[in-house]
Image: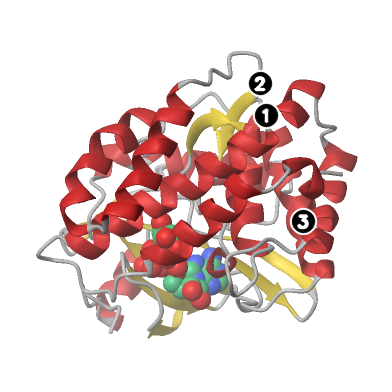
Amino acid sequence: MSVFTPVSAAQMAERLKNYSIGSLVELQGILAGIENTNYFLTTTHGRYVLTLFEKLKLHELPFYINLMAHLAKHGVACPAPIADVRDTYLAELNGRPSCIVTCLKGEAVMAPEALHCAQIGEVLAEMHMAGQTYDGRMSNPRGPAWWTATAPEVYPYMSADAVHVLRDEVRFQSRHRFDKLPTGAIHADLFRDNVLFDGDRIGGVIDFYFACNDLLLYDVAITVNDWCVTDDGDIDSDKARALLASYHAIRPFRDEEADNWGVMLRAAALRFWVSRLYDFHKPRPSELNKPKDPAHFERVLKKHVARDPSKLWL
Ligand SMILES: Nc1ncnc2c1ncn2[C@@H]1O[C@H](COP(=O)(O)OP(=O)(O)OP(=O)(O)O)[C@@H](O)[C@H]1O
Ligand SMILES: N[C@@H](CCO)C(=O)O
């Protein structure tokens, strides 16, 4: 299903001559994933993942691949890209940019407990700390300018009540500035399906293709909104505290971050509400995936608007 661009064993064996990771044992297509072609690649030296990028172009990829390499160099649990004999990570294969990264152990945990959330807080803070010395730059393609421009495109498909909530939130966010909050390289999509757990221990973080430079607290809010959410769009405060406490132990929050926590949780919910609305109502012709439920993030946002954010702080 998710092998959009097939690679033969002969092609792979030939390609591996450019690397120092042994010779081909097995190449097995990965069914999960909707954006790219992924294969589990086993060589005489170990297990790797081969990705062929179906949408991103060669020149768009270095920010993400170099970020993974930088984080892996710092010991962060994420795939390490493998350089070829020319010392480059990216090469064309069957007309697609491709790269080989180390294979992480484990599977996604879709019903996490506080113990999982605590490990997520830790790995997120480690990414943020290690990311401080990353010199790649990428503005957030899904930031305030994007949601302000995109929201009106989906109003025609929404109920009057939902338009009211969305318009109010876009306006609310535009009244806030965050000049004093710490920034850096952020993952920006640290949802449950982008982390592998080997039993109860984190195997690592994958899918860095929304990474960018933005507020660190925004990344924390995105993460809490997914890892700590309940079925009705509320946030489980025990899980949120477990995540925040282990994050704070590595990168202590500043007072200004505590002050802006509620606004940030709302911004993170708004971003995914708008992207899901857009993907739902205006899918690209090539889109193969079943769109994710936008109403989920409407519920998350409404709960945030109604609550005292300090109840979800440390
Ligand atoms: N480095 C890795 N180590 C182990 N498994 C991996 C690795 N990279 C990807 N996978 C596996 O491949 C699956 C698909 O990868 P991924 O989620 O990145 O797909 P995608 O199509 O690139 O993106 P999307 O999440 O948008 O569908 C993951 O669910 C995971 O099981
Ligand atoms: N994690 C996103 C999809 C990828 O950006 C969502 O659940 O809407």
Mark sitting earlier along the chain (2/3): 2
Which quarter of the picture shows residue 152? top left
Q: Which mark is residue 240?
A: 3
What is the secondary structure assignment of the residue under circle 2?
A: loop
Relative image position of residue 216 (x, y in whole percent): 64, 33
Residue under the point 41% across and 43% down: 88
In the rendered view, tell whether residue 167 sits above or below residue 114.
above
Disc number at residue 260? 1
121 or 70: which is nearer to us?
121
| Residue type indicated by callout 1 | Asn
Quarter that holds the C terminus: top right
In the picture as drawn, the residue positioned furthest to the top comes out as 179
Q: Nearer the viewer, residue 231 or 131?
A: 231
Disc 2 to disc 3, C-alpha distance: 20 Å
Disc 2: CA contacts within 10 A as few (<14), some (14-19) or many (>=20): some
| Residue type of the residue flagged with mark 2 | Leu
Q: Check disc 3 and report its element: helix, strand or loop.
A: helix
Residue carrying label 2: 181
Q: Residue at x 90, y 41 (%)?
A: 249
Q: Secondary structure at mark 1?
A: loop
Q: Position of residue 229 (x, y in %)?
A: 64, 65
Q: Is residue 3 left or right of residue 283?
A: right
Quadrant assignment, res 206: bottom right
The front one of 50 and 78 is 78
Tell me which label, 2 or 1, sits earlier in the chain: 2
**Percent x, y of residue 284:** 14, 60
Cβ atoms under marks 2 and 1 closer than 8 Å: yes
Per the rendering, the mark at residue 304 is: none
